[in-house]
């Protein structure tokens, strides 16, 4: 079983819809939770990160973390065709001086139809 | 400001040849990471550099892979005697020290081994 599980999709929604993207994880040491957006043939772009449990909002994007359920979500409001991309969740722990390597989900391919 | 840059953007090589991939991190970022992204495997950590500390090489898949970094600047990832399974996108990321949760990625090098 992978440390981080993410539904690969594809997920197709009409423009203006609310999109919900999710990941589950098994390692209780994870404390930082990131969402990246990756367009085809480009590098991942950091959208936002959250520490521990709670919500964080940035424009049309809201990230939620439920550590008790080991479940994280990214919501996109008023989705636009330009949001069409692969969305990757990533996580790391608070390892002090040790490597903060990211553990990634496999990504969800999102298509927003005009 | 300038982001993470990588070169070459694409590399096609014959099986058995050596290749060298380059990463130029964001100025002031002391932490540098290499990841590999391949179909079906997602993004996998390879190696981590932090300042003058010994690198964390725990993600390197075999002794054919090595990486160097001079100070807090450019890094090179070398793959010797390339194999077809080495075909992937090699991504470099950098972050401020102690903030591995905010890793910024370059565009990647797409390696194809024929």
Image (cartoon, helix red, strand yellow):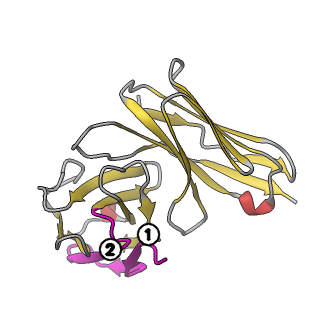
Tag 1's secondary structure? loop
Task: Write the residue at 18% across / 53% down.
Answer: B57
In this rendering, position of residue A40 left or right of residue B12? right
Residue A60 pos. (x, y %)? 75, 50
Q: Is residue B17 magenta?
A: yes
Q: Residue at x 75, y 63 (%)?
A: A82
Compared to residue B9, the image places residue A36 above or below, namely above
Residue A59 in magenta?
no
Asked where in the image residue A18 lies, by quadrant, the reply is: top right
Position of residue A45 measured from the top left corner of the image (x, y, whole percent): 54, 60
Q: Does residue B81 appear anywhere in the picture? A: no
Residue under numbered circle 2? B23
Q: Residue at x 30, y 55 (%)?
A: B97
Q: Which residue is tagged 1?
A: B106
Label 2 chain ID: B
CB-based contact (under 8 Å), mark 2 and mark 1: yes
A30 over B87 or under it: above or below: above
Span of residues in magenta:
B1-30
Vertical comparison of A8 with A112: above or below: above
Which of the 4 quarters of the picture holds residue B13? bottom left
Gap in Å between the C-alphas at discs 2 and 1? 8 Å
């Amino acid at each position: 079983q992978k440390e981080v599980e993410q539904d690969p999709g594809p997920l197709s929604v009409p423009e203006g819809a609310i999109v919900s993207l999710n990941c589950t994880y098994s390692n209780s040491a994870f404390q930082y939770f990131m969402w990246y957006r990756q367009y085809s043939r480009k590098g991942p772009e950091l959208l936002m990160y959250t520490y521990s449990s709670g919500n964080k909002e940035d424009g049309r994007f809201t990230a939620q973390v439920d550590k008790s359920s080991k479940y994280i979500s990214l919501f996109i409001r008023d989705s636009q065709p330009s949001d069409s991309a692969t969305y990757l969740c990533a996580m790391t722990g608070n390892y002090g001086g040790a490597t903060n390597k990211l553990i990634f989900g496999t990504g969800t391919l999102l298509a927003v139809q005009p | 400001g300038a982001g993470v840059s990588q070169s070459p953007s694409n590399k096609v090589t014959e099986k058995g040849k050596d290749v060298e991939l380059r990463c130029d991190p964001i100025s002031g970022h002391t932490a540098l990471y290499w990841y590999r992204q391949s179909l079906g495997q997602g993004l996998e950590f390879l190696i981590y550099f932090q300042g003058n500390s010994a690198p964390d090489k725990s993600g390197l898949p075999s002794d054919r892979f090595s990486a160097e970094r001079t100070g807090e600047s450019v890094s090179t990832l070398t793959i010797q005697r390339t194999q077809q399974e080495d075909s992937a996108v090699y991504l470099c990321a950098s972050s401020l020290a102690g903030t591995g949760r905010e890793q910024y990625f370059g565009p990647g090098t797409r390696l194809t081994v024929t």
